[in-house]
Image (cartoon, rainbow, N blue to C red):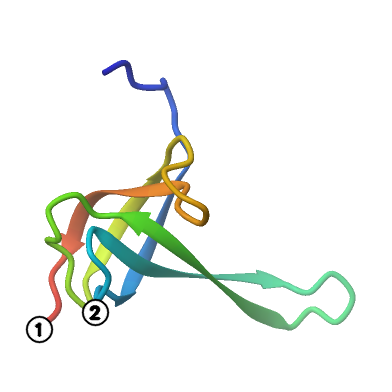
Amino acid sequence: MKERPNPRSRIGTVRSSKMDKTAVVEVVRSFKHPVYGKYVRRRVRYQAHDENNSCSEGDQVRIIACRPLSRKKRWRVAETLRKAQ
């Protein structure tokens, strides 16, 4: 399988792993508001492909972009950075 040179990647927390071969990963980013200067947090939830069902809730994972695998899955779990306690 030929890999893209620099696929887009995100680091997030697994919020749900109840589906078969799918994990819902929540990515939180914070940025400074352009007018008010306050730091604002935004969260996005991605459905990522988890081939071996190895993710569990609370794990910190890195996901990378891939081709569309289903209606909502455009990401896949690349690695688990930290397991949940």
Residue 3 occupies quadrant: top left
Mark 1 lies on a secondary structure that is loop
Q: How crowded is the residue under tag 2: few (<14 C-alpha within 10 Å), some, or many (20+)?
A: some
Residue appearing at x 41%, y 20% in the figure: 5
Residue appearing at x 79%, y 78% in the figure: 37
Q: In this picture, is 5 found above or below 78?
A: above
Residue 33 occupies quadrant: bottom right
Quadrant of the frame with the C terminus: bottom left
Residue appearing at x 46%, y 35% in the figure: 67
Q: How crowded is the residue under tag 1: few (<14 C-alpha within 10 Å), some, or many (20+)?
A: few
Mark 2 lies on a secondary structure that is loop
- Where is residue 20 drawn, in percent x and y? 23, 64
Quick one: which residue is furthest to the top in this view?
A: 2
Question: Which disc, if any, is residue 58?
Answer: 2
Question: Which disc, if any, is residue 85?
Answer: 1
The amino acid on which the numbered mark 1 sits, given as a three-letter code, is Gln
Q: In this picture, is 33 found above or below 1?
A: below
